[in-house]
Image: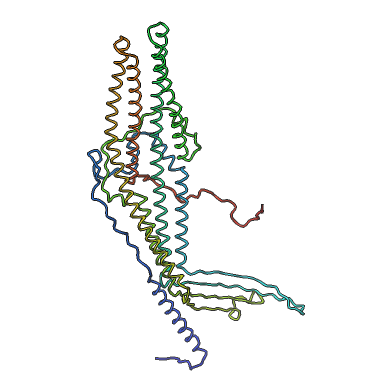
Amino acid sequence: MTLFKPETGSACAVPSQRRKTWLRLGAGLMAATLLGACSVGPDYQRPDVSVPGKWRNTTGETPASVPQLANWWTQLGDAQLNSLISLAVQNNLDVRTAKAKVREARASYKQASSSLFPSLDGAAGVTRSKSSGSDSVGTLWNGGFDAAWEIDIFGANRRAKEAAKYGLDAAEEELRASLLTLIGDLATNYVEARGFQQRLKLAQDTAKSQQSSADLIRKRFQAGSSSGLDVANAEGQAASTEANIPALKTALAASMHRLSVLTGQQPTALTDRLLASSRIPTPKLPIPVGIPASILLTRPDVRLAERQLAEATAKIGQATAARYPSVSLTGSIGTAAADIGDLGKNSSISWAFGPSLSVPIFNAGKLAAGVEIAEAQRDQYFLAYQASVLTALEDVENALVGFTQERKRVASQRRSAESYKSAAELSRSLYQTGAASFLDALDAERSTYSAEDTLIQSRVRLTTYYIALQKALGGGWTGKVETDKPEVIDKNTGPHLSVAY
């Protein structure tokens, strides 16, 4: 039953008309929001990449079982190396730079996400004025709010947010790649430093022994039981071995300096810590290597390339959306009065609300070219992703061949060194009994030194191939990495007096 029906044109009809207007605006807003659910441009899908079913160069020492990539360097059994890696992860400058890039990408993602929401700005002010020819001074108080919202009908802002999310993923993968490179470089330099130490000790001991032999030959020459040729050959060989010592010291110092810098310290910071010689770390067998498909998940450079491809794909949609119309809703409400107490009264309030439509009509192909640029960039990242997979496969196969062949070389070099050592002892005994010439003894000693020095170098290469294999498989740091802490802590960033210089 109708209790009251307002007459047409009465005051009661106004609120009803306003309600209809607001309902129409609300319906339009809802429709625009629903339209905002669509997006233009390609939706990203991870590309299929063909990889072999198994590694070609595996052996019994490198089976296809699941690799132990987490903290792989601990398998070398060197506590000093473990400590240096932990120190480097915390202090290395490249890693800290990668952390800052993660923070930058995270902030960019937040910034891109904010474009999906309305913006609201407030303003307030007071104006004192005096008209020309008048003695009266007036005061005007005012305040208000402005709001704006770009309705993302064709998904430009959503594509920007999507691209920023992929960019954040890429930054995190770049951090993982920096850690992988750091650990590999530090382990390689550490092993090389231990190798230089052993080669240096071998050269010093050999030179000392050869110099003692030269002194003995000189005394025999003075006694008339040896020739001047034997003295010259003995002293020449001792000097030749001594000549290797400065070069080895230089190489050892360079490795120590590199280790210090990799741990974020000045070049000589680790010299005393590493001064005491230690064994060359040797990997334990077997070394599982898994299957080729696993590198798509474990290699950070491959994952980085894939995330960059995803980011470039999202940017195509962002460029495509620029060719479509855009709709924005704007509104404002304000109040102005000569007396501050009148602010907020109905008579002092003004407002405005309404949508706006922007349609690209003619831009001489600029927007279409923007889409073509984005597509070409996507193609480049697609090819870069494929190249990263091929490079990863190549790295693993190379490391497998190198490790396998170097193991054979180490075994051969060990037999060679043992044989030459026996030959040197025999030649020395024969020379002392007069059954062999001094040149035979010198040649045997020279061969022994060369074989033992080569054996040390081969053992270093064997371990560096192991390191290269772990890097190629994607082994790296699995512990927590803090990325929220800024490097520079700014102080007094609030309002304050500044001094210009």
| In the depicted structure, whether residue 215 falls above or below residue 260 | above
- Residue 11 vs residue 99, the one in the foreground: 99
Q: Position of residue 400 (x, y in %)?
A: 28, 41
Q: Quadrant of residue 307?
A: bottom left
Residue at the (48%, 72%) spot, across then down: 149
Residue at the (33%, 26%) spot, across then down: 451
Q: Quadrant of residue 141?
A: bottom right
Q: Is residue 216 visible?
A: no
Residue at the (30%, 22%) spot, across then down: 420
Q: Position of residue 117 (x, y in %)?
A: 46, 68
**Residue furthest top as drawn:** 223
**Residue furthest left as drawn:** 60
Q: Which quadrant does the N terminus fall into? A: bottom left
Query: Total number of numbered labels?
Result: 0
Q: Position of residue 142 (x, y in %)?
A: 62, 74
Q: Is residue 321 left or right of residue 487?
A: left
Q: Position of residue 79 (x, y in %)?
A: 38, 34
- Residue 369 vs residue 37, the one in the foreground: 369
Residue at the (45%, 74%) spot, across then down: 326
- Residue 14 vs residue 175, the one in the foreground: 175
